[in-house]
Image (spheres, grey):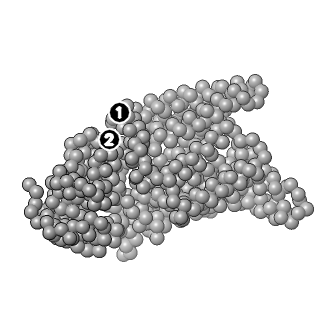
Amino acid sequence: MTAHPETAVQPAAAHPSALRFLMPSVSDIVFTVLFLTLAFGSLAPRLLGDADTGWHIVNGERILETRTVPHTDPFSYTLAGQPWYAWEWLYDVLAGELQRRAGMNGVVLLSALLIALVFATLFRWTLARTGRLLSVAGLLVLSLMASSIHFLARPHLASWLLVLVFWRILDDYVSRPGEAQYRLLGLPLLMLLWVNVHGGFLLGLVLAGIYLLGEAWRARFDGDSQERAEAKLRMRWLGGTLLLLFLATLVNPYGLSLWTHIYRYLSNRYFMDHIQEFLSPNFHGAAEKSFAAILLICVAALALHCRKLTPARLLLILFSVYSGLYAARNIPFAAMLLTVTLAPIIAETLAGAARAIPSVPASRLLARLDAFSAHMGSMELRFRGHALPCLAVALGIWVGAHHGRLGARQLMSAEFNPAKFPAGAANYLANSGIRQQVFSPDSWGGFLIYRLYPNFRVYMDDRHDFYGEQFVKDYVKVRDVEPGWQEVLARWKVNYVLIKPASALANTLEEMPEWRTAYRDNVGVVFVRVRPLP
């Protein structure tokens, strides 16, 4: 029987309670494998592939010490004391507390938990919409691979989970308003958390706006008078929810000025055209190819789908496709939203194709696969104990609380990769008593803050929204040895340069008599002025 895309699948008769609790479901296996692989396995190094994690941790530790959210910059010597919007302060506090209790292992465990929870939830909720395990599993694999582009220990992971929660509540309300009407009231409460955890809170407003526009279309053009009246009622509820969501975004340490800051940042063409993660995806990478596969499936599914899509779901598809093509950083949530939206369409299309011409061998094969997929989906939804994920999380907590050890075995020793980040050069700076006036790449700034703060202040890190367009342009001028680069270094009284050995700046400084090499390894080289600027 074909699953209606707007009706949740009801699981078949349950197994005995003990079996349901102990038997792992597919979603349990997804969670456990992801969690263990990201925490202890081959994917663990990916989580610390970005230096941003460093300053988030240190900022959280400062907030815990001072019990105040910063409004000015404490990390740079160039713009020290200038206004700074630490808009992810609540995540920083959690990361700082985990650092205190379990070191970097704790931060990695939190990130592994969030990623595993996101994709186990994505699988379970999508399956509940379709009842067809095989099509959901295929989309999940592609979504997981596409999202791996941002498997990083940063606060955006919380946004991934909250996007799914917002989608579930909004879609349930539109599909089954009698059951989910009052769950809408939980969204503003979640927004109070989201606005203080990550800038992705804007997605919550966008999702609510998409479903509001969808119901506005139905109220104006769809169905009979009763259906239009019901759509108008849903419009009022969604409109009120959207207003409450906006008001909730003002409950942050910076109030309405946070909106002004975000608008200036996201509307800055220089940043959007030059910051790597804001650029359109390069489809030669594995993650980007996986997203491209989802897009192709989207085109095929919509072309073969016979039933009319609801306006909200069509808008959701269009928004997801555009977002993922606009900027690489949007690929994960775009892939997830396409997965939950396309899975019912694919399931219905395949079931319809299986029934179309029963005598054709291909149709009979599709029918068997569809029946098997439905049976496996029904079995999957029976198991709700989730004992295996609980054991995996308990193991993670135990290992984290014991300095990464399980008995005599060291399972975790999370740290920034010394082959990517300048650990040796950082030790040199610390041992030499150098506290500031060091030019270094923005991508290393968070690492240097993590390793050397409070005894060291960076020239710059990758908080580009804080430093501003002109400062970033001057930084690029120095990094790429463009005309005027020496004047920039002189303006900020830079006496040391920490840079990659094979870079253009390193090659240039090696040829200049006013600079000498003070430290060098395979990752970083430190140059010092022969005659320091006062």
User: Is disc 1 in contact with disc 2, using a CB cutoff of under 8 Å?
Assistant: yes
Query: Which mark is on residue 85?
Result: 2
As drawn, the residue found furthest toward the right would be: 359
Locate residue 254 relative to residue 174 in the image: left or right: left
Classify residue 431 by image quadrant: bottom left
The residue that mark 1 highlights is: 257
In the figure, 452 relative to 270: above or below? below
Q: Earlier in the sequence, mark 1 or mark 2?
A: 2
- Within 10 Å of the Cα at label 1, are there few (<14), some (14-19), or many (20+) other Cα atoms? few
Q: Quadrant of the C terminus?
A: bottom left
Q: Nearer the viewer, residue 4 or 436?
A: 436
* Mark 2 residue element: loop
Query: How far across and how far down the image is residue 277, in percent?
Result: 44, 54
Q: Position of residue 205 (x, y in %)?
A: 51, 37
| Residue 399 drawn at (x, y percent) | 39, 65
Query: Crowdedness of circle 2 by 10 Å Cα count: few (<14), some, many (20+)?
Result: many
